[in-house]
């Protein structure tokens, strides 16, 4: 599929097996701050470069036919960052939707926000709701953007929803199973995460998709997020294809 009308820099990688791609890729886009610091620039400069890296990864995921891509853009803990950095991230978000939404829509990308949208500032909230409304019926790549998101908060929220349903007599406690629980998460209806990528070498989950990564393969790369290009993405996908996934069982 010709995407965003631009030629891609890297030719399709013959080494990737198109029949064994992950259905759902999640990415912790880490290292924007360090990338900027190495260039004696403010952290916001790194976030801006991070958005450019993200655009290419969205395109590639769509071109490869990956079903779902979930990216960690802003956590519930990120509000504690310096005011000017938070405000730069909020501006970038508005800019991203302003610039990209039509092309994402034309390319059938379906956008979902994971997180507390109501807790976002009004202009961002309106842009997010408009993006979800516009693209909600699209059948292409499911692009999930974790924003004002925390996994513990998501799990507690699901538990509360279920407790209320039990309290109101809608369901009995013994009916609570994994399927019901999953239907109360922001990721309802999405396949489990197959591959979790974290850039910048840090080996932690940072309160991201704790439930959904139960059987995900983890690939941590030293590359800082703004430098994570198509070649790096394909290398991570290749690494995933080398893994022996047993889901707690044994090899036949
Ligand atoms: C982590 O790097 C990155 C973030 C907290 C923000 C990620 C956001 C973007 C890539 C752009 C915004 C997204 C959209 C959808 C417009 P860090 O700042 O913690 O880096 P450091 O660990 O080197 O300090």
Image (cartoon, rainbow, N blue to C red):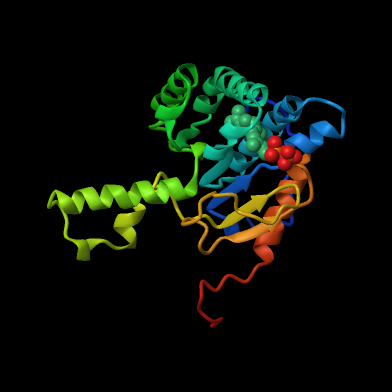
- Residue 117 left/right relative to 197: left
Q: Residue at x 40, y 44 (%)?
A: 186
- Residue 176 left/right relative to 35: left
Q: Position of residue 122 (x, y in %)?
A: 45, 18
Q: Residue at x 53, y 22 (%)?
A: 101
Q: Position of residue 104 (x, y in %)?
A: 54, 27
- Residue 16 left/right relative to 134: right
Q: Position of residue 197 (x, y in %)?
A: 65, 51
Q: Quadrant of the N terminus?
A: top right
Q: Residue at x 43, y 37 (%)?
A: 139
Towards the viewer: 175 or 159: 159
Q: Residue furthest right?
A: 39
Q: Residue at x 72, y 45 (%)?
A: 12
Q: Is residue 176 visible?
A: yes
- Residue 118 left/right relative to 27: left
Q: Residue furthest left?
A: 169
In the image, residue 41 sits, relative to residue 14, either above or below, namely above
Q: Is residue 145 visible?
A: no
In the image, residue 172 sits, relative to residue 83, either above or below, namely below
Q: Quadrant of residue 227?
A: top right
Q: Quadrant of residue 125?
A: top left
Q: Position of residue 4 (x, y in %)?
A: 63, 26
Ligand 1 located in image quadrant: top right
Tell me how many marks there are.
0
């Amino acid at each position: 599929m010709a995407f965003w009308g631009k030629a891609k820099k890297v030719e399709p990688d013959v080494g990737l097996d198109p029949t064994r791609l992950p259905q759902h890729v999640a990415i912790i886009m880490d290292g924007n701050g360090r990338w900027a610091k190495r260039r004696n620039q403010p952290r916001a400069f790194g976030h801006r470069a991070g958005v450019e890296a993200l655009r290419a990864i969205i395109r590639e995921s769509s071109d490869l036919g990956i079903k779902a891509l979930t990216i960690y853009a802003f956590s519930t803990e990120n509000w504690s960052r310096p005011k000017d950095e938070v405000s730069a991230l909020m501006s970038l978000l508005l800019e991203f939707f302003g610039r990209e939404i039509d092309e994402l829509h034309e390319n059938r990308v379906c956008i979902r926000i994971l997180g507390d949208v109501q807790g976002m500032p009004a202009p961002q909230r309106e842009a997010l709701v408009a993006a979800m409304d516009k693209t909600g019926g699209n059948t292409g790549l499911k692009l999930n953007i974790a924003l004002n998101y925390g996994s513990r908060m998501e799990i507690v929220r699901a538990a509360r929803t279920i407790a209320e349903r039990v309290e109101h007599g809608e369901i009995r406690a013994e009916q609570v199973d994994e399927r019901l629980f999953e239907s109360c998460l922001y990721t309802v209806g999405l396949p489990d995460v197959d591959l979790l990528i974290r850039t910048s070498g840090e080996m932690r989950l940072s309160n991201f998709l704790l439930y959904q990564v139960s059987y995900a393969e983890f690939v941590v790369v030293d590359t800082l997020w703004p430098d994570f290009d198509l070649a790096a993405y394909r290398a991570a996908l290749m690494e995933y294809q080398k893994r022996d996934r047993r889901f707690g069982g044994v090899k036949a």
